[in-house]
């Protein structure tokens, strides 16, 4: 049993000593003290089915024993920075990660977060091309440091600092976008940005395959191959941000970009890669990787032995337990069942996503697509009261984000749908 401080005590300390910008879910925030597989437990020992996995960070299940054992064994042996000496944990994980990549993508740079990974990817694209301009998609999220905040294209996440050389293309959003799913029409904007907003040469293009923070928006089919073509013609590199969609989450493939049939020049990842520990990575080709030899470049803790020992264990668990397959089978089933809910509840405007990266958008008017911002908050509270945790996001904050640990079962999917059904009926 838990004998630590109460939720009220923690909330008081947090209000006094922690960042005032921290936010939390629910009117009475939960005090989560333990996690096991797809479940979280609060201070009273109450169990919740976790359908958000700490924003898609936990991939093979909370506190998976194999991952915990790998980290613990490494912690007892050596905790150190990444640089200066040889250590097998870093090299082993880099090799394993490279084996999951297509083409010539095989040089790995480790970081501590997704933001760092994207900052590094953009830096390399700029150095390699000698150009400065970067194109990203509106509604995207790429991080919160100066450069990645610039690439992020939602006012909710932007502060007024210098964000030079960033251009945001019209979002190929099949539900809310002006051209529906017409990839060719959307991609004209990429060409126009190049023609009218830059010298005609760009450093690169960065995009998620499925926008996570943006509300599980799947980039229109056919868009990425066309956008990559335009960007490469203008001398730019193509960066795939796999921070949320990567690491088996989309089910049909290991990486989100693979669902679009493209091979990026640089791939960035974080979140699921460490199953909850701080770890990120950039993978690129040997040729592009060379740019960082022009000066000194290192990251003290990025890829430290503790985190990379954990990362390698995560990859092994994904394979051993066939979790990508599970994400595909259970994710497809869950999506079908959510589509069924859409027929029953007028408030569900859209159901979308792939594998275990699913979104349910709530609207008060299906024709006008008016965001149901208040309603989603109430529904989340009801679901929490019934023992289910889910995320929300999207520009208007009206989209359920369903990104469970990849061990989520058929029974969990059924329970999740029943609880969402009841919660929506209560509105
Ligand atoms: N890219 C994407 C697609 C993300 O969702 C996030 C985090 N939400 C980031 C980058 C930034 O990652 P981090 O918070 O680890 O810096």
Image (spheres, rainbow, N blue to C red):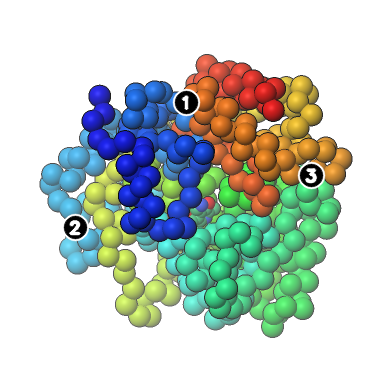
Counting from the top left corner in percent of width and height, residue 26 is at 51, 38
Q: Disc 3 designates what residue?
A: 370
Question: Label 2 vs label 1: CA separation?
Answer: 36 Å
Residue at image coords 72%, 78%: 197
Secondary structure, mark 3, is strand
Vertical arrangement, residue 155 with respect to residue 307, above or below: below
143 vs 229, left or right, is: left
Viewer-nearest of labels 3 and 2? 3
Residue 364 horizontal/vertical position (percent): 78, 38
Q: Tag 2's secondary structure?
A: loop
- Residue topped by disc 1: 49
Provide the residue designation for mark 2. 80
As helix, strand or loop, the secondary structure at mark 1 comes to strand
Disc 1 versus disc 3: nearer the observer: 3
Residue 422 visible to the viewer: yes
Asked if one can make out residue 317 in the rendered structure from this viewpoint, the answer is: no
Left/right of residue 302 with respect to residue 70 in the rendered view: right
Which corner quadrant of the image does residue 372 belong to?
Answer: top right
Categorize mark 2 by other alpha carbons within 10 Å: few (<14), some (14-19), many (20+): some
Q: CA distance from mark 1 to mark 3?
A: 29 Å
Mark 1: few/some/many CA within 10 Å (<14, 14-19, 20+): many
Q: Earlier in the sequence, mark 1 or mark 3?
A: 1
Say which of marks 2 and 1 sits in front: 1
In the image, 381 versus 99, the foreground residue is 381
Quadrant housing the N terminus: top left
Q: Quadrant of the C terminus?
A: top right
Residue 178 in the image: above or below residue 419? below
Q: Residue 238: which quarter of the image?
A: bottom right
Is residue 141 placed above or below 128 in the rendered structure?
above
Which numbered disc flags the more N-terminal residue, 3 or 2? 2
The residue shown at (80%, 43%) is 369
């Amino acid at each position: 049993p838990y004998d630590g401080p109460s939720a009220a005590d923690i909330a008081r300390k947090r209000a006094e000593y922690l960042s005032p910008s921290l936010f939390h879910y629910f009117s009475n925030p939960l005090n989560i003290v333990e996690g096991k597989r797809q479940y979280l437990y609060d201070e009273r020992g109450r169990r919740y089915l976790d359908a958000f996995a700490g924003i898609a960070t936990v991939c093979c299940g909370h506190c998976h024993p194999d991952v915990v054992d790998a980290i613990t064994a490494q912690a007892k042996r050596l905790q150190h920075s990444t640089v200066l000496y040889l250590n097998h944990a870093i090299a082993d994980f880099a090799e394993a990660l490279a084996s999951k990549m297509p083409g010539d993508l095989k040089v790995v740079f480790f970081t501590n977060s997704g933001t760092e990974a994207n900052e590094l990817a953009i830096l390399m694209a700029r150095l390699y091309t000698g150009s400065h301009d970067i194109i990203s998609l509106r509604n995207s999220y790429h991080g919160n440091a100066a450069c990645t905040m610039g690439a992020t294209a939602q006012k909710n996440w932007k502060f007024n600092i210098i964000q030079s050389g960033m251009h945001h293309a019209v979002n190929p959003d099949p539900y809310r976008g002006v051209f529906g799913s017409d990839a060719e029409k959307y991609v004209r904007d990429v060409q126009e940005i190049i023609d009218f907003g830059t010298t005609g040469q760009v450093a690169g293009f960065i995009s998620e395959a499925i926008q996570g923070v943006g509300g599980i928006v799947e980039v229109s089919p056919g868009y990425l191959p066309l956008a990559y073509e335009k960007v490469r013609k203008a001398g730019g590199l193509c960066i795939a941000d796999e921070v949320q969609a990567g690491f088996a989450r989309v089910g049909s493939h290991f990486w989100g970009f693979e669902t679009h049939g493209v091979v990026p020049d640089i791939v960035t990842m974080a979140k699921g890669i460490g199953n909850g520990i701080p770890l990120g990575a950039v993978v690129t080709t040997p040729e592009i990787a060379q740019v960082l030899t022009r000066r000194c470049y290192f990251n003290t803790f990025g890829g430290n032995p503790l985190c990379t020992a954990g990362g390698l264990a995560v990859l092994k668990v994904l394979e051993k337990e066939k979790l990508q397959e599970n994400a595909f089978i259970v994710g497809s089933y869950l999506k079908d069942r959510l589509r069924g809910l859409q027929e029953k509840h007028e408030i569900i405007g859209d159901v979308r996503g792939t594998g275990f990266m699913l979104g349910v958008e709530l609207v008060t008017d299906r024709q006008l697509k008016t965001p149901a911002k208040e309603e989603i908050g109430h529904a989340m509270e009801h679901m929490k009261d019934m023992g289910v945790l889910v995320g929300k996001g999207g520009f208007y904050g009206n989209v359920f984000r369903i990104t469970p640990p990849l061990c989520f079962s058929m029974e969990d999917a059924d329970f999740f749908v029943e609880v969402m059904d009841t919660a929506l009926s209560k509105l």
